Amino acid sequence: MSPTLPGLSHHRAKVNGTELHYVEAGAGPLVLLLHGFPEFWWSWRHVIPSLARSFRVVAPDLRGYHLSAKPASGYDLTTLAGDVAALVDHLGTPAMVAAHDWGGLIAYETAMDHPGAVRKLAILNAPHPDAWIAAWLSHPEQQRKSWYVFFTLVPDLPEELYLEQFRAGTIRLATVMPPEDVATYRRAFEIPGSATAAVNYYREFVRDMPRRRHVAPRRIACPVSVLWGSLDVALDPVVNDIARDWIDDFSVTYFPHNWHWLAEEQPRAVIDHLETFFATTAEGC
């Protein structure tokens, strides 16, 4: 059973050859919230009630997570961005998007592949996918922080390790939230097929790296605002410096005393920023 919030409704949509579960609240311009690893829509629980006062807020479980379908394939960025674009089409209007971690990579890809689906992007500690590759190739600090990405190519072991970390309470989420909240994420991650689907995001990205290295990133024309916890142990802020060259309207706000989970660590600051950033809509990317 999925957790819930007052005023929240649960829905399912068949899009892009799969079925996504999503929650919805409020009315007004569409705001789409995309979670990261190893989360699900509930990672936005602190943000949804406030945004729903002014916006139609939709937060899906991404492909393979929680109550969404867990197909054997489709965990590459092209397909995942297609999921988001198809969901936006199902909802009937272009979206302003806030996205964290893997949701952020997918949001960047959606803005490149389906620019008409996205009006604005707010990114929380997530790299532009091509900027991550460029940083990994040329910056030792990002190389040092990225070792675990390639560990995911090992069959079966990574998902078993993440499940064990959840059960032992040593998963990184546990550093920023109480045990009962970690248990909510653990129950979602233990749903059969969820752990493998989540790790497959990494596997497919690594497999696609050689191709992406030889394809020029497409420009993003819509406004992009990044919120970045400077203590992130997996991502170096150099990825923002690289991405800036490919985005017409780009800004970064750094949080020097926080790390990867800003919607958990600084929910009020995130809410205030999103409300201001989304107050006026843009035409699209």
Image (cartoon, rainbow, N blue to C red):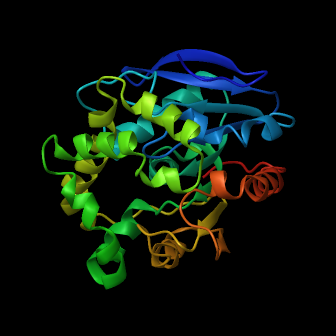
Task: Residue lying at the far left in this picture: please name it.
Answer: 155
User: Residue at left 30%, top 84%?
Assistant: 140
Left/right of residue 32 with respect to residue 189 in the rendered view: right
Instruction: Place residue 193 in its image quadrant.
Output: top left
- Image coordinates of residue 4 in percent, x first then y, are 66, 23
Name the one closer to the observer, 107 or 176. Answer: 176
Instruction: Place residue 218 in its image quadrant.
Output: bottom left
User: Residue at left 30%, top 42%?
Assistant: 164
Q: Is residue 171 visible?
A: yes
Name the one closer to the observer, 82 or 174. Answer: 174
User: Residue at left 45%, top 75%?
Assistant: 236
Left/right of residue 262 with respect to residue 6 in the rendered view: left
Instruction: Place residue 159 in its image quadrant.
Output: top left
Q: Is residue 104 visible?
A: no
Name the one closer to the observer, 100 or 211. Answer: 100
Q: Is residue 230 above or below residue 170?
A: below
Left/right of residue 99 with respect to residue 127 in the rendered view: right
User: Residue at left 23%, top 47%?
Assistant: 158
- Image coordinates of residue 145 in percent, x first then y, are 34, 72
Left/right of residue 129 with respect to residue 99 in the rendered view: left
Q: Is residue 45 above or below residue 277?
A: above
